[in-house]
Structures are given as C-alpha cells and as structure tokens.
Amino acid sequence: MQVELEDVTPLRFPDGSPVRAASAVAPFGAGFLVVQDDATHAAWCTPDRVTAVRLLDPVEGLDTFEKHSGTKHLKPDLEAACPLEIDGRPAVLMMGSGSSAARMRWVLVVLEDGQPGVTVTDMTPLYATVAEQLQVDPDVLNLEGSCLVGGKLRWFHRGLPAAGMPSGSVDLDLAQVLAAMTGQLLPQAVEVTSSRSYDLGQSHGIGLAVTDAVALPDGSVLVSAAAEDSPNVIDDGPVTGSALALLVNDVVTDVLPLPLINGEVAKVEGLMVIEDDGDPKQGTILLRAVVDVDDHLAPSLALRLRLRPAGV
C-alpha cells in the first residue's frame, strides 16, 4: 500500500481560537466531530462552520488545561471516539484514556433533531478490569483508539514500546457498553475479552504505538501510530515518526510512514473513513485524520489522506 496527503486544513472556531490537541475524530451528521483531549468541548466541523459542543462540566472552573499553567492533571483526556448508530440516530462514543480518576469518564453524543445530546458516565470500575486483561498497572493505562469489529467495541491501548509495554487491545460487549452508559448496567459488569498485543515496528529507533483505529469494510483494521520518545505514558516527548498500520486477523501486514507536513512529523491522533468516496475498482480508501500539534496556541490540523494498493 501507499499513502498520499491530499489536503491539510488548520481547524479554528469562528472567533479564531484554535481547535486544540485533537485526539480523535468521528463522522457526525453533516460533518465530523473532533475531540480535544485538553478541553471540555468537542469541535463539530460542518461545511459552513466549526461549532463548540460541550461534553463535560468545567473542572475547578476551567474548560481548558495546559502543562504550563499546572492544570494538565485535571484534563479529561478523551482520546478515543467511535461512531455509532442508536435507534437510527448518528452518535459518537468518546472514552477517557485512563491512568487517573479525571480520565475515566465516557461521553455519548447523539444527534437528534439537528442538535447533539450528551450523556456522561463515570466508567472507573471498568478500567481496572481492562488493566488486568492487558496485564498493565492501572496508573499507566493509555487507551487511545476504538472501533467496531464483528459487533464488538475494540479498545486500543497505546502502551510505550520503548519501556517494554507494547500496544494492545481488548474487546467490549457493545450492548453492555450502551447499557452502562444509560445506567442500566454497572460499569464493572461490562465483559472484557480477547486481550491482544501488537508490534508495529520502529521509526528512527523508537517503537511505534497505536494512537487510533478504524475498521475497514473488508473487516481489517487500520491504526495510526506514533513513535514518541517519552520517559513515561503521561509526559509528551518528541515524535520521531508516524505511520499507518494495517491489521488483518490481528496480524500487522503493512506499515506505511506518513508524509511530513512542512517538514515536521504529523502526530496523527485520530482517523475516520470518509464514506462513499475513493474508487472501489482501484481499492483506494479516503481517510480523514487529525493531528495534535502539541501546542495549545496552534490549531490542530485536519488531513485528507488517500490509501492505495501498491502500484495503483
């Protein structure tokens, strides 16, 4: 396979403020929803505007969080976003990354009569089960991607390959997940199965780790990955490379380096398939990706990527 960069768009709200720290993206209504991992709002991007959608109440009076202000530990760190359909309505399920109490809430956004409705649930007990299945300490969980595979919600742990912690995933029962989100089931009762680990290789000597995932029509899974030179799973570090990796029957079959943007590595943190585009005869796949530029004053980037079979 080969990947081509077709377009780069900086994301800003109508007042000029940046869409910050893009950590996930999912189709939503006539556009797409971008999750900001250091804010209480998402950005709903439609053809005519970018609208802030409140996901969570302010934390200690704050709606944004940064390392320089000493508030990073308060951020909700919603890192995974999975598109769903609930009773015929578009929906997106967003999931905290774990590792601290602030990062174990889930948010379900459902579009009804043109307006997003939001449900927030504390899923803390589920994280302990996931950590046990992945055989990692709960305080190093870094769950960054999710997608639907065979009717299950597959949840991806980024890990830290440089420290001997590979990327991995578990499967959750979707019906039980939705029951827990609506208070019909306790979070600890959600079934967690099928723990896996992945070796995505390296970029410039640093292990690639999963940052998001999307399911493809043929049943395979495409993940974005970043090689981040960080001493631990909490602190940011320089990103030496980024890639897309294809998983077929849980086996890594191809790893494609992502193009540089203005000479810089694109830290892709979110992926979605653009529906009804591309050329099925040639087997191309059109993707939208979002890039976290690791600067709260700079806008996140929306990329348009085309994935082609080799030689096409």
Image (cartoon, rainbow, N blue to C red):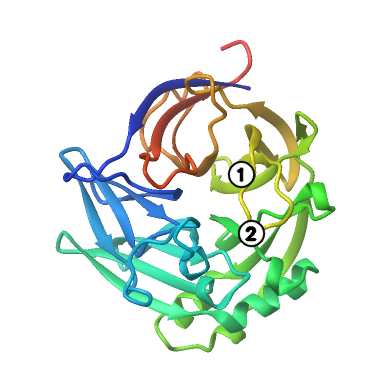
Return the residue at label 2: 234
**Which x, y percent locates residue 309?**
60, 20
Marks 2 and 1 in Cβ contact (< 8 Å) = no
Residue 295 appearing in the image: yes
Residue picked out by circle 1:
221
CA–CA distance in space, label 2 to label 1: 26 Å
Sequence-wise first label, 2 or 1? 1
Residue at point 63%, 70% (across, down): 99
Q: Tell me which amino acid carries mark 1.
A: Val
Q: In which quarter of the image is residue 48?
A: top left
Q: Residue at x 46, y 71 (%)?
A: 106
> Can the viewer see residue 149 in this picture?
no
Which mark lies nearer to you, 2 or 1? Answer: 2
At 38% across and 26% down in the image, what residue appears?
A: 8
Q: Residue 145 carries which label?
A: none
Left or right of 202 on screen, residue 295: left
Q: Residue furthest top?
A: 311
Residue closest to the eye, 204 or 250: 204
Mark 2: amino acid: Ile
Is residue 252 shown above or below 3? Answer: below
Name the secondary structure under disc 2: loop
Q: Residues within 10 Å of mark 2 (few under 14, many from 20)?
A: few
Describe the element under mark 1 as helix, strand or loop: strand
Residue 280 to residue 140: above or below = above
The spot of residue 3 in percent (x, y) is: 55, 22
Q: Residue at x 34, y 71 (%)?
A: 56
Q: Quadrant of the C terminus?
A: top right
